Amino acid sequence: MGARPMAPGKKNTWRLKATLVFLDESGLLMAPLVRRTWAPVGQTPILYQRTRSRERVSMIAAITVSPRRHKVGLYFRLLPKENVVTHNLLSFLRQLQRQLGSPILIVWDRLSVHRSACTKIHRRNHSIHSAFLPPYAPELNPVEAFWAYLKMNPLANYAPRDVEELCLCAERHTRDIADDQLLLRSFLKASPLSLRLK
């Protein structure tokens, strides 16, 4: 049985010696995501929160795989009281590309903001390349596993007083996750994409 050929995205990453970047956006709300918890017998835990608050924190996150596939990274940006629009995304990508110091291949979904950013990137920057995931396949993006972990573990049952407190808490927990190589690798393994790490 012969070896299976590489997918086009993997070929491009290998040929360009590029860092593979999985990117996605999400939002953190002021209302806590309630999960079961422990409490002394007869003492029901109570979560105090600001009701009817529509304030939120938008977040851009990227899970990166180095060209030699030995290191996984997590980069993020918090946008309090803002939505992710094209100029936020382009600014994040430029800063990410400078920080990584190598060409990057972005893998993301077909959100209109991504398509708009993609058009502008290809006109201006030849060291940033992109590939789209198939439609209706969020499970292929490892960043989705990161969102699920962040919201269902460190931020579960957390009721902040204001957006600034939510930002600080999300930043602290995300930095902790970024320092944990085993956890970052587990996000990649949760995706059905075949990607071998060293």
Image (cartoon, rainbow, N blue to C red):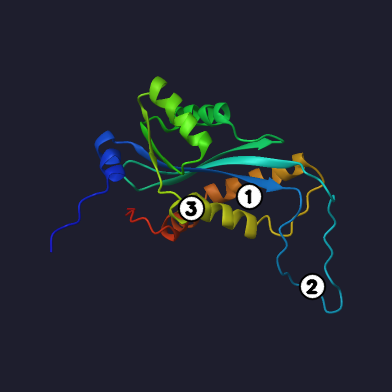
The mark closer to the camera, 2 or 3, is: 3
Check disc 2: other Cα within 10 Å, few if <14, some if 14-19, many if 20+: few
Q: Secondary structure at mark 2?
A: loop
Q: Amino acid at mark 2?
A: Ala
Q: Can you say whether 192 is above or below 119 in the image?
A: below
Residue drawn at x 83%, y 79% as measured from the top left? 41
Q: Position of residue 21 (x, y in %)?
A: 42, 41
Q: Is residue 153 visible?
A: no
Q: Which residue is mark 3?
A: 138
In which quadrant of the rendered image does the N terminus lie? bottom left
Q: Position of residue 178 (x, y in %)?
A: 53, 47
| Label 3 to label 1: alpha-carbon separation | 23 Å
| Label 2 to label 3: alpha-carbon separation | 35 Å
Ranked by sequence position, the earlier of labels 2 and 3 is 2
Ranked by sequence position, the earlier of labels 3 and 1 is 3
The mark closer to the camera, 3 or 1, is: 3
Check disc 1: other Cα within 10 Å, few if <14, some if 14-19, many if 20+: some
Q: Amino acid at mark 1?
A: His
Ranked by sequence position, the earlier of labels 1 and 2 is 2
The answer to whether residue 159 is left or right of residue 109 is right
Q: Which mark is residue 39?
A: 2
Q: Secondary structure at mark 1?
A: helix
Residue drawn at x 64%, y 55% as measured from the top left? 151
The answer to whether residue 62 is left or right of residue 82 is left
Q: Position of residue 124 (x, y in %)?
A: 41, 20
Q: Tags 3 and 1 in contact by the CB under 8 Å rule?
A: no
Q: Amino acid at mark 3?
A: Pro
| Label 1 to label 2: alpha-carbon separation | 23 Å
Q: Which residue is mark 1?
A: 173
- Asked whether 115 or 191 is in front, the reply is 115
Q: Secondary structure at mark 3?
A: helix
